[in-house]
Image (cartoon, rainbow, N blue to C red):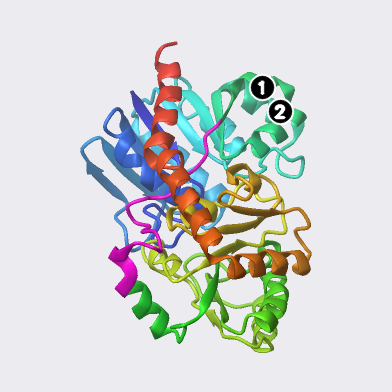
Amino acid sequence: MKIALICTEKLPVPPISGGAIQIYIDAVLPILTKHHEITLFSLHNSKLPDQYKAGNLRHIRVQGKTADEYIYNIKKAMMEDSFEYDLIHVFNRPLWILRLNDAAPNSAFSLSLHNEMFLPKKIDEARALQCINKVRFITTVSQFIADDVQKMYPAAKGKLNVVYSAADNDAYVPIWSEDIKEQRGGRRKQYGLDDRKVILYVGRLSKKKGAHVLIKAMSQVMELHPEAALLFVGSKWYGSNATDDYIVKIQEMAKKLKGPVIFTGFLTPQEIPKYYNMGDIFVCASQWREPLARVHYEAMAAGLPIITTARGGNAEVMQENINGFTIEEYNNPDVMAEKINYLLEHEEEAIGMGKAGRKLAEEKYNWQRVAKQLLDLFDTVSSK
């Protein structure tokens, strides 16, 4: 089949500036292109060629300072290219299904949902139903997203397919592995964390991600465990170390803690696995209805016990007391501190949770499984 993948307008592929959708696409491309001719439409970046072809993969990158400009340029490129696609798979932008229909009237369409994109503030009912009727299938990154769509639009029921994301299990080496013992020690020493128990946070620094709740929790943790340290990996936005009032606030909060707090700033996806190797406990402090944060897959691949919040789809990859803990009182720093303290005081149990998470990552949350699910769905289009 000839398939077009339409990436979102925020960041380029490959994910040189990060981005969960960009990482997802980049990871499955090598597997998908073994079976189909794939054209990927994504955002222009000065570090990448506007057009590139290798084997069954074509990259077409277009300008787009706004979402409207971006999708207009993709539609224009499609019409000028006069290349007919059997399937056009659109990532996270339901409205684009309708906008691209004119450029490819003979193509089938499908949709990949990574957020709550069918909320009334994002799409009106009439166009939502048009989109649902038009697509052959919809993939979602969590059951939470699928249930949300079905509740609002029962007509989508037969088209929804949950395809959990993954991490590269070759890139993330478990923290107990002898292969990274020297690297782990060296990097921790570099940050002055030699003999510390490192609580790790990876993600954007924003209020909805809950960094402030974690800092409040760590105030209690460090009272009981002076060996504890806090490591923040990430920045306000992908590819940038720009700051804002929230970041200034949490940095000031961090200065009041008794133990060390490190802010790394933005790191590329290629750098991040090494920083997971510095951690002992991973915390996802999300305060919003998180679709299902990909950091859970990364933490499992790195062999870290996880403490996460019961927000959105996060709990779907958690086996309680097996690979970590899920906090129902997501905005309560006391509860978060209690769980962190428990893992610090039960080291063998924490290591066991990390090993259980790694096993889940290897057996279930890998890119081969993601790609196979997509290929099976692609086959349903070719058989019609």
- Indicate left or right for 93 with 2 as reference: right
Instruction: Name the residue located 66 percent from the left edge and 62 percent from the top edge.
Output: 285
Give the residue type at disc 1: Lys
- Disc 1, disc 2: CB below 8 Å? yes
Quadrant, the C terminus: top left
Crowding near the residue tagged with mark 1, few <14, some 14–19, many ≥20 C-alpha atoms within 10 Å: some
Q: How many marks?
A: 2
| Stretch in magenta | 162-182
Q: Would you place residue 333 above or below residue 103 in this image?
A: below
Crowding near the residue tagged with mark 2, few <14, some 14–19, many ≥20 C-alpha atoms within 10 Å: some
Q: Would you place residue 86 above or below residue 39 in this image?
A: above
Judging by the rendered image, the residue that carries numbered circle 1 is 157
Q: Position of residue 128 (x, y in %)?
A: 69, 30
Q: Does label 1 or label 2 sit earlier along the sequence?
A: 2
On residue 241, the disc is none
Give the residue type at disc 2: Gln
Which residue is farthest left? 55
Give me the C-alpha separation between circle 1 and circle 2. 6 Å
Frontmost residue, 354 versus 111: 354
- Residue 329: quadrant of the picture: bottom right
- Residue 107: quadrant of the picture: top left
Circle 1 sits in a helix, a strand or a loop, which is it?
Answer: helix
Judging by the rendered image, the residue that carries numbered circle 2 is 150
Q: Would you place residue 7 above or below residue 19 in this image?
A: above
